[in-house]
Image: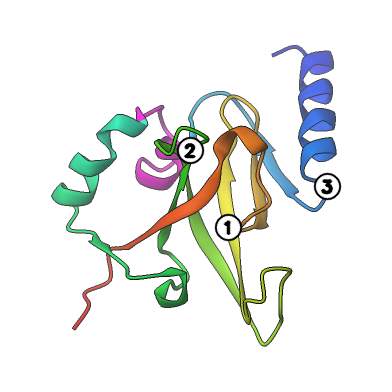
């Protein structure tokens, strides 16, 4: 993207999610490439089940079971998987608008836009809502 386009994209993202922190901006990879391919490529979200199976991920029962390094899968308005992010921070003891006592900070790549650190629910509306939590930790 040209510098003017990058500035416009960043301005749009900040208007949609003012608290999100820009980490980098590139179109070389997408959210799946960030989470599963070390920021080297784009991966179609339809391949996520294959990745979860091959890499022996386990689905967590709820958001309350998630830890740093786990994956959050978002469902879009059609209730299909639309986006993924990596949990990078847990904040204990705080209460959000939904009454939760633990807040999750996520790192995710917003399409061809930037890579952002943001709170769990603070994403562009098209990505939907957090719906699934997965881990590659070995659970007992």
Q: Which residue is mark 3?
A: 18
Asked whether 55 or 124 is in front, the reply is 124
How dense is the environment of label 1, judged by Cα within 10 Å: few (below 14), some, or many (20 and up)?
many
Taking 123 as reference, is 67 above or below it?
Answer: below
Q: Secondary structure at mark 2?
A: helix
The picture places residue 131, in percent across and down from the top left corner, at 44, 54
Q: Local crowd at mark 2 within 10 Å, few (<14), some, or many (≥20)? A: many
Along the line of sight, the residue nearer the viewer: 49 or 98: 98
Q: Which residue is mark 1?
A: 106
Q: List x then y, in percent, for residue 17.
A: 77, 44
State the extent of the magenta-drawn residues as a range.
Answer: 31-44
Between the C-alphas of marks 2 and 3, the distance is 20 Å
Mark 1–mark 3 CB contact (< 8 Å):
no
Residue at 28% over, 71% down: 137
Query: According to the image, what is the colour scheme of the structure?
Result: rainbow
| Residue 118 position within the rendered picture, expressed as x and y whole percent measured from the top left | 67, 55
């Amino acid at each position: 993207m040209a510098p003017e386009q990058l500035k416009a994209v960043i301005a749009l993202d900040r208007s949609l999610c003012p608290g999100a922190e820009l980490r980098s901006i590139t179109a070389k990879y997408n959210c799946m490439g960030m989470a599963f391919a070390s920021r080297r490529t784009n991966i179609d979200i339809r391949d996520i089940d294959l990745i979860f199976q091959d890499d022996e991920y386990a689905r967590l029962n709820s958001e309350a079971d998630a830890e740093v390094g786990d994956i959050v899968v978002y469902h879009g308005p059609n209730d299909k998987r639309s986006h993924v992010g990596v949990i990078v921070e847990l904040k204990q003891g705080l209460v959000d608008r939904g009454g939760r006592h633990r807040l999750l900070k996520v790192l995710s790549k917003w399409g061809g836009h930037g890579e952002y650190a943001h709170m769990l629910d603070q994403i562009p509306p098209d990505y939907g809502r957090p719906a699934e939590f997965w881990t590659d930790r070995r659970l007992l």
